[in-house]
């Protein structure tokens, strides 16, 4: 066998998996990454304005005390170059590079039941074998490029935000952008002052609150560093670990004046997750509470955007139940004369022709550059591109034909020794600490298999079914299914409901893992 373990993907998940398996378990481990460098999300998403919206001091690995102390982030929220720098530094710190092949795409993997190993095929044709595979292919990694008629022959520049080429310029150009999710909001805010003209082709208006980002004061940074242990310990008892003190009260528990005050305070403080989870505890559970938040944000949009016609187009018609957004002055950009918003729900995009976007009404917009901020085929997107075959040649596409599922977001029945990081049904929470939980669990499971002298470990079908019944039930107790978004895979036309998350969040998910451990891993089969 070539390796004990192969890791796929060099984002937060893959890098930590390589470190844990190689350095802590002593496994001969190699990582393959299709990009030219490490960093995953933060290697690919180099569009203007790209940033994390988890608080900087929590958007990092929590396990390494020394690294926490030497990590000198400059803003409340890390900008894309800062996260990339952090992850490149992490790879160097643990000499991970020597066991990483970049620019190497994995095309597929097949389970060899005779040898109890995976035969992994690289895109250039070579086969490598390993007892274990850890697939850290990313949650938001496979770009969604809608098949607009005329896309291939568009004569202007065209770029998807997650494939932003270096040296791309937008200054003094006529730019069009499709997409007003988290990414679109960040790009629009960043480029609006410099473009000649910006046409925002908006299908669904979204709710966004101020990010409150800014330079981090020296004292604040020192205070965080001095109290890191307490901060992480406290955060790990929360649902989201996003640095938002989660509210314990319903929006129904207070007077209208007090509700307004709480929303107002959060608006001034900033942060999308803070607004959604820090104001009241039932904004995603109760439609009336949700409506209070909708109305508050709508009133802010009307206050900020001076042109009433533009403001009305920017007012969302959906409920407030997509991933919460925040921005560095998004709505303000629409007060610029060079920025227009076009409602492409009322008048959909018919085709691209030459360097123009043509709507069904025949209205056309001539552009130098078209930005696709159209998001991702989240969760299973990268898996669906793979020729991944488990026991008896079962393909992952067949296994997931009614929607992606797994046990704990980590393992599938019929795919022994294949561990996912961020698979369907993982914790709905800040990613780096959640990723640490997945990777640590994978390391534990491998160690457990070793101690039982087992060469194969697999989640039972019943474990997968029971976990997904829980995920379904928790999701359906929220109002999230009432909107189309990547959280349930409903942003992709025709995609079956795919639950990317266990809505119990981080702390409950951690409790579940503790239970799995103390029960002696009875949800898994171990075989020699
Ligand atoms: P990724 O970082 O996506 O890495 C996956 C890697 O796998 C990629 O490099 C990809 O090239 C590689 N890969 C995939 N398929 C193959 C293959 N077949 N062969 C070889 N390599 C392959 N999360 C938060 O918690 N807070 C935030 O504030 C936040 N902000 C975000 C902002 C943006 C713009 C985006 C896109 C995402 C954000 N996220 C945020 C989510 C973010 O994706 C995670 O936080 C985290 O970076 C995921 O790490 P990962 O290792 O699981 O996946
Ligand atoms: P999102 O949140 O999925 O947003 C994608 C945007 O693109 C959204 O506004 C979509 O409108 C729009 N879109 C997608 N397809 C089309 C077509 N065919 N026509 C018009 N408009 C379209 O992706 P993001 O990249 O912004 O954010 C993803 C996550 O990455 C984010 O949550 C962070 O966690 C980081 P729609 O709303 O579907 O009408």
Image (tube, rainbow, N blue to C red):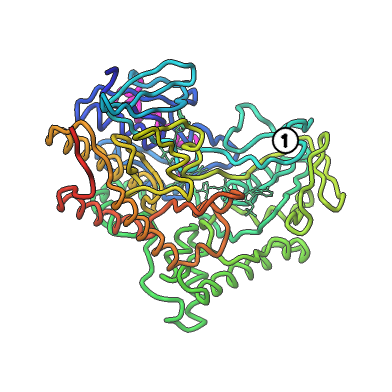
Report whether the residue tagged 1 is closer than 8 Å to ligand 1.
no
Q: Quadrant of residue 102?
A: top left
Residue 476 in the figure: left or right of residue 304 = left
Q: On the picture, is 38 further left or further right than 188?
A: left
- Left or right, 367 with respect to 126, comes to right
- Which residue is disc 1 drawn over? 171
**Residue 259: x percent and y percent?**
49, 77
Element type at marker 1? loop
Give 342 or 455, whichever is nearer the viewer. Answer: 455
Quadrant of the image for the C terminus? top left
- Relative image position of residue 289 (x, y in whole percent): 50, 75
Is 332 above or below relative to 4? Answer: below
Which contiguous range is marked in magenta?
78-97
Q: Residue at x 41, y 34 (%)?
A: 11
Indicate the quadrant containing the N terminus: top left, top right, bottom left or bottom right. top left
At x 23%, y 49%, the residue is 523
Foreground of the two, 407 or 206: 407
Prevailing secondary structure class for the magenta stretch in the rendered image:
helix
How many neighbours does mark 1 have within 10 angstroms: few (below 14), some (14-19), or many (20 or more)? some
């Amino acid at each position: 066998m070539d390796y004990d373990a192969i890791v796929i993907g060099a984002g937060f998940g893959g890098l930590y998996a390589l470190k844990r398996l190689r350095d802590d378990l002593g496994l001969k481990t190699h990582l393959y990454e299709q990009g030219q460098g490490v960093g995953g999300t933060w290697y690919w998403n180099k569009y203007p304005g790209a940033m994390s919206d988890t608080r900087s001091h929590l958007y990092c690995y929590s396990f390494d005390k020394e690294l926490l102390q030497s990590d000198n982030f400059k803003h409340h929220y890390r900008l894309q170059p800062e996260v990339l720098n952090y992850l490149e530094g992490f790879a160097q710190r643990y000499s991970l590079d020597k066991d990483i092949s970049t620019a190497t795409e994995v095309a597929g993997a097949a389970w060899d039941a005779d040898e109890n190993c995976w035969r992994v095929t690289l895109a250039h044709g070579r086969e490598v074998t390993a007892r274990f595979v850890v697939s850290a292919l990313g949650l938001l990694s496979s770009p969604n490029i809608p098949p607009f008629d005329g896309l291939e022959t568009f004569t202007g520049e065209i770029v998807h935000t997650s494939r932003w080429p270096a040296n791309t310029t937008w200054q003094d150009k006529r730019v069009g952008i499709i997409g007003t999710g988290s990414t679109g909001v960040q790009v629009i805010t960043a480029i609006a002052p410099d473009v000649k003209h910006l046409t925002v082709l908006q299908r669904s208006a979204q709710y966004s609150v101020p990010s409150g980002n800014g330079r981090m004061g020296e004292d604040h940074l020192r205070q965080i560093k001095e109290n890191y242990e307490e901060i992480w310990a406290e955060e790990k008892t929360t649902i989201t670990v996003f640095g938002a003190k989660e509210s314990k009260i319903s929006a129904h528990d207070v007077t209208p004046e007090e509700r307004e005050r709480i929303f107002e305070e959060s608006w001034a403080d900033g942060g999308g997750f803070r607004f959604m989870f820090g104001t009241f505890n039932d904004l995603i559970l109760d439609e009336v509470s949700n409506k209070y938040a909708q109305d508050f944000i709508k009133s802010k949009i009307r206050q900020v955007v001076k042109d009433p016609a533009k403001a009305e187009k920017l007012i969302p018609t959906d409920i407030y139940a997509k991933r919460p957004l925040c921005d560095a002055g998004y709505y303000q950009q629409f007060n610029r004369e060079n920025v227009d918003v076009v409602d492409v729900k009322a008048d959909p995009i018919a085709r691209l022709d030459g360097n123009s976007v043509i709507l069904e009404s025949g209205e056309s917009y001539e552009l130098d550059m078209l930005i696709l901020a159209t998001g991702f085929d989240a969760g299973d997107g990268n898996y669906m591109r793979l020729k991944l075959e488990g026991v008896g040649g079962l393909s992952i596409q067949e296994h997931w034909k009614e929607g992606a599922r797994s046990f704990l977001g980590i393992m599938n029945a019929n795919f022994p020794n294949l561990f996912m990081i961020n698979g369907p049904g993982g914790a709905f929470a800040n990613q780096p600490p959640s990723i640490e939980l997945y990777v640590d669990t994978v390391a534990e499971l491998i160690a457990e298999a070793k101690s039982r002298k087992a060469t194969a470990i697999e989640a039972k079908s019943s474990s997968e079914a029971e976990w997904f019944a829980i995920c379904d039930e928790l999701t359906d107790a929220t109002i999230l299914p009432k909107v189309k978004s990547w959280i349930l895979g409903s942003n992709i036309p025709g995609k079956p409901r795919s639950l990317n998350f266990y809505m119990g969040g981080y702390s409950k998910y951690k409790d579940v893992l503790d239970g799995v451990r103390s029960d002696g891993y009875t949800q898994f089969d171990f075989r020699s």
